Amino acid sequence: MKQFFGASQRGDLKEAVRGLSTPQLIMLISNRENFQSHVKELEALYPGVPSIGCIGMGYDNRINEKGVSVIAFSNGIRAAANVLEEVSVMPVKYIERLEQDVRNTNASQSDTICIDFCSGNDACVLTTIYTVLKHRNISLIGGTGDAGMVSANGKVYQDAVAYALVKNQNGRVKAYKENIYHPMKDYRFIASRTDKAKYILGALNGQPAKKVYQSILHVSEQEILTRTFQNPFGKINGDDTCIISIKEVNGDALTCFRQVNDSDVLVLLELGDYKAIVKNTIQTIKKDFPKISAVFSVNCLFRYKLFTQNHYMEQYLSDMAALGSHAGFVGYGEHYNNRFVNQSMTCVAFE
């Protein structure tokens, strides 16, 4: 298969798709102002081609912050694109669409990936989608777009998740998740006084969450929102740790970017040697796939900000380009199988 990446910094869709012919799946990453018109224009340019889209920033070997980016697959894939609606209420109501698409693409564990763009309520959405994917052990990667809108097959949706099933007819696929953080000392907490609907973390080991965070790291209230780049929380999930970013201070509580429940076991994380971790990820993918057709990735907005502040973003994209054709988008939360994580990178490699 082949991966196409095109971009226009000024938001000209025709410029972004220049050179794109006979695509079998298209992913649109647009800006808020032009998203809806770009969705219609893309469908007019490539009628009937499966497509999904969201609002965000796209990249290959450089970041496209405000324009429009197009990522497309061709030459040896089979794809289906669709949407589950009412994700804040009852996404399972539309699950038959995914079940039918899995059957139609003859999706299987070794050669099929599900890519999703979500408008919100991610944890519930992933649980719903995975009720179908788990029966065939199909992996999923994806992320949350901006402004509560996504698109599928030329139509814009709110309160929805757009997904694409991609079957590689010429080889394997494999999903990866990269974590650049590790536990800080022996700090472990039991969460309490949480509000699941508002993602509020009220207390840690019975003490106000804000006070605990400040006392450990010796930071002011104003510094908490930037310190989360270096020291987010982590939720123990079996042998894995899901990263939880701090969104804002709420009195003595902390509002997070993902749900925390009463009695969840949390740890405090600290930033590791992210350059070495990235190189290790690249080597792992190369070892798994001596011949790579493409890599599609989703990077968290907070990773983008961290890398940019440390003057590493351009180098990061250059390092990832060593894999060959690498492209992706910056999201507001990352998806990996049935897990909703923060401050991470997820990707899929195609043989």
Image: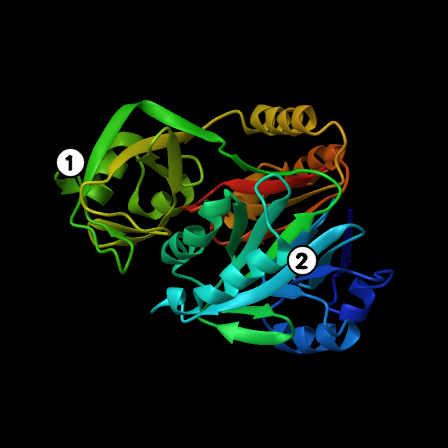
Marks 2,1: beta carbons within 8 A:
no
Q: Looking at numbered disc 1 in the image, what kind of residue is underneath it?
A: Asn
Q: Residues within 10 Å of mark 1 (few under 14, many from 20)?
A: some
Image quadrant assignment for residue 291? top right
Secondary structure of residue under mark 2: strand
- In this figure, which colouring scheme has been used for the structure? rainbow
Q: Looking at numbered disc 2 in the image, what kind of residue is underneath it?
A: Ala
First-in-chain label (2 vs 1): 2
- On screen, residue 345 versus residue 259, left or right, reads right
Q: Which residue is mark 1?
A: 205
- Looking at the image, residue 293 lies above or below residue 9: above
Residue found farthest to the right: 19
Residue 69: x and y, percent? 71, 60
Residue found farthest to the top: 185
* Count of labels in the image: 2
The residue positioned 40% from the left and 71% from the top of the image is 86
- Asked whether residue 166 is in view, the answer is yes
Q: Residues within 10 Å of mark 2 (few under 14, many from 20)?
A: many
- Asked whether residue 30 is in view, the answer is no
- On screen, residue 116 versus residue 284, left or right, reads left
Residue 275: x and y, percent? 60, 27
Secondary structure of residue under mark 1: loop
Q: Which residue is mark 2?
A: 79
- Looking at the image, residue 294 lies above or below residue 291: below
The residue positioned 36% from the left and 26% from the top of the image is 183
Tell me the quarter of the image containing the C terminus: top right
The residue positioned 57% from the left and 75% from the top of the image is 156
